[in-house]
C-alpha cells in the first residue's frame, strides 16, 4: 500500500528543474538525507549515537521537522505574533531592521525573533529530492498515514516560509552567503524562484498549526512559557542575547522614568503644602491657588503619561493582536478540522 503524491503542491519535474543532475537516479540520492552511504530501503540509519546505536529515519525526520513545543503553545501564539503565514520579513528586510541572521538547526527556533536576531533553520537538501517524497509516501519510513500527514504538513509549511524569506534575488544572495548559508549549494535563483512560487497559494495544502504564524517574538514566548508553567525559558535561549547587561539596560529607561515621575509628584505635593502656609493676603492667596492648581495638574499629568506608556501601549498592542485573532476565527475552526483528519490521503 502506498499514498499518492498528487496532493503535493509540486511535482517531480519541479524538483528536477532545480538541478538537472537530479533527473538521474544515481545522483538523486546525494540530496536524499544527510545519512551514511546510501543503502537498501527502508533500513537506512542516519547518525551513530554515543551508545553505538543509530536513530531511525523516522526519528530523524521528526526531530528535524516537527515542532511539538510550539504546537503545544498554539492557543497562546497570538500573543507572540500575528496569525498569518505571510508575517515574515524577507532576508534583506531583516538586515534593514538591524537583525542578525542566526542559523538554528532546531526547527522549534525557525523564524523565532529575538531583540536583535532572527533565527532561521537552513533548508534541508532532502526536501528538494523527489526520491525523499517517494520514499515517504510509499511508507518506507512509517506505515502510519497520520504520521505521513503530519510530516508533510510540517514540511510544506517550512518550505512556504522560504517563499516569504526569499522574495528578491538579493535575498537569495544573502541566503547563499558562506557566513550564514541557509540554502544547499548548487541552486540557481531563476529555477529556485520558480519552485518557491508554487507555494504562493496558501490553500494548496493545509500546513501545521505552527506555520499558521510567521515570525514569533522570543521575549513573549518566554513570558508565555512562564505563565503556562511550561518552563522558565523557551528552548534555553536568552531573548536578550547579550545577557544581564542588555536586560538591565533595556529596563533602565522605565526605571528612570518612574523615579523622575515620583520626584515630580513629591515636588508638586510640597508646593501644595507650602502654598497653604503662605501669609494671608490677597496677592499671596492668588499665588497659593495657582500653585495648588499647578501642583494637582502636575500630579494628574504625570500619572496619565505613566499609565499611557505602561498600560495603554501594551493594551493597544495586545488588543490589536486579539482583534486580529478574532477576525481570523474561521481560520482557527478550519485548523481544528484539519487536526481532526480533514487531510485524507488517497491510497493507491
Image: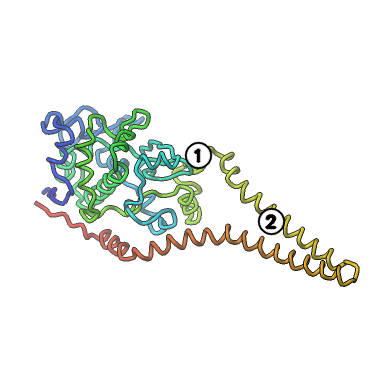
The circle drawn on residue 261 is: 2
> Residue 53 at what x, y percent from top left?
30, 32
Which one is in front in this view, the residue at disc 2 or the one at disc 1? 2
Please say if 245 is above or below 152.
above
Q: Quadrant of residue 29?
A: top left
The circle drawn on residue 241 is: 1
Which numbered disc flags the more N-terminal residue, 2 or 1? 1
Identify the residue at horizontal 60%, vertical 61% (top origin).
Answer: 307
Q: Quadrant of residue 180?
A: top left
In the rendered structure, the answer to whether residue 87 lies left or right of residue 334 reads right
Identify the residue at horizontal 91%, vertical 68% (top origin).
Answer: 279
User: Tag 1's secondary structure?
Assistant: loop
User: Tag 2's secondary structure?
Assistant: helix
> Residue 20 at what x, y percent from top left?
14, 31
- Circles 2 and 1, Cβ within 8 Å, touching? The answer is no
Real-space Cα distance between discs 2 and 1?
30 Å
Q: How is the image coloured?
A: rainbow
Identify the residue at horizontal 38%, vertical 65% (top origin).
Answer: 326
Amino acid at each position: 500500500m502506498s499514498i499518492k503524491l498528487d496532493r503535493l503542491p509540486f511535482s517531480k519535474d519541479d524538483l528536477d528543474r532545480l538541478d538537472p543532475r537530479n533527473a538521474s537516479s544515481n545522483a538523486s540520492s546525494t540530496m536524499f538525507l544527510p545519512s551514511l552511504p546510501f543503502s537498501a530501503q527502508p533500513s537506512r540509519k542516519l547518525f551513530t549515537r554515543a551508545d553505538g546505536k543509530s536513530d531511525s529515519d523516522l526519528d530523524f525526520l521528526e526531530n528535524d521537522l516537527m515542532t511539538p513545543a510550539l504546537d503545544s503553545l498554539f492557543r497562546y501564539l497570538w500573543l507572540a505574533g500575528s496569525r498569518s503565514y505571510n508575517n515574515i520579513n524577507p532576508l534583506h528586510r531583516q538586515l534593514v531592521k538591524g537583525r542578525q541572521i542566526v542559523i538554528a538547526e532546531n526547527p522549534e527556533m525557525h523564524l523565532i525573533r529575538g531583540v536583535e536576531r532572527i533565527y532561521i533553520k537552513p533548508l534541508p537538501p532532502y526536501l528538494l529530492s523527489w526520491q525523499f517524497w517517494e520514499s515517504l509516501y510509499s511508507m518506507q519510513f512509517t506505515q502510519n498515514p497520520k504520521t505521513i500527514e503530519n510530516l508533510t504538513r510540517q514540511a510544506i509549511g517550512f518550505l512556504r516560509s522560504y517563499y516569504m524569506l526569499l522574495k528578491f534575488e538579493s535575498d537569495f544572495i544573502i541566503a547563499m552567503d558562506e557566513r550564514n548559508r541557509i540554502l544547499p549549494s548548487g541552486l540557481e535563483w531563476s529555477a529556485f524562484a520558480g519552485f518557491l512560487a508554487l507555494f504562493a497559494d496558501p490553500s494548496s495544502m493545509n500546513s501545521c498549526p505552527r506555520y499558521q504564524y510567521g515570525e514569533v517574538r522570543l521575549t513573549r514566548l518566554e513570558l508565555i512559557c512562564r505563565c503556562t508553567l511550561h518552563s522558565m525559558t523557551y528552548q534555553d535561549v536568552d531573548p536578550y542575547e547579550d545577557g544581564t547587561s542588555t536586560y538591565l539596560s533595556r529596563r533602565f529607561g522605565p526605571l528612570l522614568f518612574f523615579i523622575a515621575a515620583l520626584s515630580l509628584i513629591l515636588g508638586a505635593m510640597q508646593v501644595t503644602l507650602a502654598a497653604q502656609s503662605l501669609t494671608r493676603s490677597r496677592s499671596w492667596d492668588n499665588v497659593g491657588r495657582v500653585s495648588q492648581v499647578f501642583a494637582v495638574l502636575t500630579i494628574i499629568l504625570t500619572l496619565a503619561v505613566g499609565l499611557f506608556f505602561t498600560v495603554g501601549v501594551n493594551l493597544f498592542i495586545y488588543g490589536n493582536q486579539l482583534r486580529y485573532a478574532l477576525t481570523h476565527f474561521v481560520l482557527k475552526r478550519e485548523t481544528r478540522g484539519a487536526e481532526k483528519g480533514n487531510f485524507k490521503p488517497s491510497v493507491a
